[in-house]
Amino acid sequence: MAYNLLLGGAAGQGIETTASILEKLLQRSGCHLFTTRDFMSRVRGGHNFTQIRFGDQPLYSHANMLDCIVALDAPTAALHTDRLSPDGVLLCDESVESSDPRTLRLALAGTARELGNPRYAGSVAAGAVLRLFGESFDETAIREILGTYLRPELADGNTTAFRRGYDMATTQFEHLSGDASDQMLLTGSQAMALGALASGLRFYAAYPMSPSTPILEYLASKSLEAGIVVVEQAEDEIAAINLAIGASYAGVRAMTATSGGGFSLMVEALGLAGITEIPLVVADIQRPGPATGLPTRTEQADLQFVLSASQGEFPRAVLSVRSHRDTWHQTLRAFELADRYQLPVILLGDQYLGDTSATMPVPEVLPVRLPVEAMAEALEKTETSSTEDRPYLRYEITESGVSPRLLPGKSPHLVIVDSDEHDEEGLITESAEMRRAMVDKRARKSEGLATEMEEPDWIGPTLEGEPAPTEMLLLGWGSLWGPLHEAVAILTAAGHSVGALVWGDLYPFPAARLTALATSARKVVNVEQNSTGQLARLIRQETGLACHASVLRYDGRQLSGDQIADRIQKEVSE
């Protein structure tokens, strides 16, 4: 069982702080959480809201129907009441006019003024919410959590405001409690940053660009605590990626992150990493484009772009992140693959998952093998094969395409790299024969890389532990994992034979599971957050399979499970 709570108001009314405090209190009571944030690209005014979904079981997505709306201004009530359930509550200030019988008017603003600070209104409302949902009033916990956001005197005043709001309301919902009190509560951006730290990240460079900026902010706040981690705010995205390439060349694990516009500036340097065979992790946290687009909204429109970004041909891996836990997992894999195959790995996220906070079990942190440790094998091979007339070959032509990698200054050997085409030693060449050999050498990395690509997650019925054929097959990628998880549950409960494949690894494209299931499906439908069906295009390119229909959304907002289910129901009935 789960409840869906929306807090809305204008920018500057403390929506984000109030929501963050509420979700921490709910987690302490054991609730599982999935909190989405919808905010306009402005400092003051406009309409912002945060949606907190909490329950006694793990939650995978936001939901459309609301159980409670907390309206700190009149527009919030007007904009969202159509989504309020018949038994829901519209909690608002006594000044808001509403003829809806579900309205609960409280003296939010008046109480805040009485306590000496108009901004206490959010805390008065939050206290009332705790009472509505049957939560106990834990003053110690409230004061402790408030203290992480506010000065002591403000924490005291807001604690009093919580108490006043709590006393104004009565319990109207059954109390829920799960087993998530000892889990982590973090955003997708924080999960990616922590995954990078667990991977042995030692250098991060970025230029602030929403929605990737929280990664930069989190790593900067944790750099000293994490050890020797250099976090550099560069003057632009071109500098950021070149700094990361330089750090990786020197022998540390390095990363940069941006959004689509910043990635556009990075693509020439991406090719530099490709031809010099320097490991690199680049995260593209997608938002709607082109140009400035919608800076604070979500989309999945960069897939085709990153598949071929930069001039020329060179191998790369493209991974997407599907959930908070998967973000941790995929970030670790990105660093491992970049080092193992000496190539750039692109991590595709989006604003929806990056800014959404959720509970997740604490992941196991395993030892990682850093480049300086892996160099021992390369050095041993070099020492046995090098002679005076055959020096260290940084780009030795090998069967796998991967050459022994030494780090500059870590051995007696000279490490030569160049962005021009080069021979095995790293010296510039215009030889036609050597050019073909180097292109083929680099391309062979894709063969090994393809064997490490993970098949898409299967959401649906199983037979002896394997995916069972269904009449309808839904295809998605990245952050649609959660909504598709819930859509399949809704459709299955309605009697439909349905399953979903959700890709994390996108290139080289893993197609075995799709090929096995698509042959028995009556209808194959791609579900994507873009206007052209970019995953469907990739599938057609790699397998020849064409989808029968599409469910697409590209207005900057994320599809929910119930919205997907509704669209599929219409497809079935046609």
Image (cartoon, helix red, strand yellow):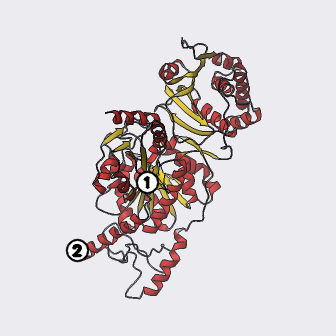
Q: Position of residue 147 (x, y in %)?
A: 71, 37
**Which residue corresponds to the image point at 36% horizontal and 68% vertical from the top-left?**
447
Question: Does 265 appear above or below 565?
Answer: below
Specify few, some or many for label 1: CA neighbours under 10 Å numbering under 14, 14-19, or 20 or more: many
Q: Position of residue 73 (x, y in %)?
A: 55, 20
Report whether 135 appears left or right of 393. right
**Which residue corresponds to the image point at 44% horizontal and 55% vertical from the top-left?**
282
The secondary element bearing badge 2 is classed as helix
Q: Which quarter shows the N terminus?
A: top right
Specify few, some or many for label 2: CA neighbours under 10 Å numbering under 14, 14-19, or 20 or more: few
Q: Amino acid at mark 2?
A: Ala
Q: Please give the residue where the numbered disc 2 appears in the rendered image.
A: 432
The residue sitting at the right extreme is: 140
**Which residue corresponds to the image point at 32% horizontal and 55% vertical from the top-left?**
308
State the separation of the CA atoms marked 2 and 1: 40 Å
Q: Position of residue 296 (x, y in %)?
A: 45, 37
The answer to whether any part of residue 230 appears in the image is: no
Question: Does 435 appear above or below 472?
Answer: below
Q: Please give the residue where the numbered disc 1 appears in the rendered image.
A: 456
Q: Position of residue 3 (x, y in %)?
A: 59, 31
Report whether 335 appears left or right of 198. left
Asked whether 258 or 507 is in front, the reply is 507
Q: Amino acid at mark 1?
A: Pro
Q: Which circle's residue, 2 or 1, is located before the other in the chain?
A: 2
Question: Does 273 appear above or below 44?
Answer: below
Asked whether 569 or 139 is in front, the reply is 569
Q: Which quadrant of the structure image shows residue 109?
A: top right
The secondary element bearing badge 1 is classed as loop
The answer to whether any part of residue 164 appears in the image is: yes
